[in-house]
Image: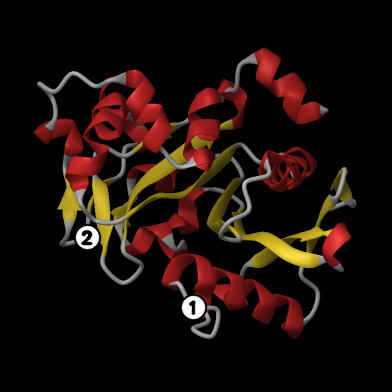
Amino acid sequence: MSGIFRQRYSARFATTKADIAGAQALRGLCFRGDDTLEDRDDFDDICAHVLVEDSRLNNRLVSTFRILPFDDGSKVSQSYAAQYYELSGLAAYPGKMVEMGRFCVAPGLNDPDIFRVAWQAMAEYVLEHKVELLFGCSSFKGIESAHYHDAFAFLAASHLAPRPWLPRVKSPLVFRFARRLRLFTPNRARALRVMPPLLRTYLGMGGWVSDHAVVDRDLNTMHVFTGLEINRIPQQRRRVLGA
């Protein structure tokens, strides 16, 4: 990854244990509300970690995410998402895949350039390594599904995964929104307003989701499996990625 830079923010790969510890502390603050409760798991040891830093604040870490590459779908069962979703359909995927996870931005920071730099870093990796499928779990804060009925119904109506790749239910705690909300008419504006920004970006590029959300009580979130096939990105958006 070259030095992705936009105004005051830059992105780089973690290179030291201290870098990774910093990412885990920021994740702890974002996902658990306390930077002394590091968010860590066994996947941290096999993932590459991307750090977005603020040059105006002595290179303070403001965002992070991690990536896990696969040559094809044959080992997708070893992904983080496979703990929660039955991914046997994707095992037949022929191209290179990358799982993107644990994306977060420091609380209280609303500068859209932080998100843009993070996405540019991911886009550069995808293009450089000829990745064909980007996937991960997109998280909604909280575990009360009623707050997200518009969003879930909108996803069910317009953005479900192609049937060959559709993740099946594996987790014991799920909200089957495609089934439960099939007669619910969503308010599109409200749906987009409550969606995670990263998920909105995926959808804008032709991304798709599972037909159910997993309830994660540990992180107090509900998440949907999200995929983006690079060759399905509209040409105009591809030019944005290339830039």
The Cα–Cα distance between marks 2 and 1, rounded to whole angstroms, is 27 Å
Q: As displayed, is residue 241 above or below residue 198?
A: above
Amino acid type at image mark 1: Asp
Amino acid type at image mark 2: Ser
What residue appears at the point 56 percent right and 22 percent down from the top-left corner? 232
Query: Looking at the image, which residue sits at the far front?
Result: 108
Locate residue 57 relative to residue 166 in the image: left or right: right
Count of numbered circles in the view: 2
Residue 171, which numbered label? 2
Give residue 119's quadrant in the image.
top right
What residue appears at the point 20 percent right and 46 percent down from the top-left corner? 145
Can you give x and y, in whole percent of width and height, for residue 70 in the image?
59, 55
What residue appears at the point 68 percent right and 65 percent down from the top-left corner? 49
Select label 2 or label 1 by which is in front: 1
Determine crowd level at label 1: few under 14, some 14-19, many 20+ residues with C-alpha closer than 10 A: some
Q: As displayed, is residue 74 above or below residue 149?
A: below
Circles 2 and 1 in contact, beta carbons < 8 Å: no
Q: Secondary structure at mark 1?
A: loop
Can you give x and y, in whole percent of width and height, for residue 75 in the image?
48, 58
Q: Which residue is mark 1?
A: 34
Locate residue 111 relative to residue 176 in the image: left or right: right
Residue toward you, 168 or 192: 192
Locate residue 177 relative to residue 89 in the image: left or right: left
Residue 198 visible (yes or no): yes
Q: As displayed, is residue 141 above or below residue 209?
A: below
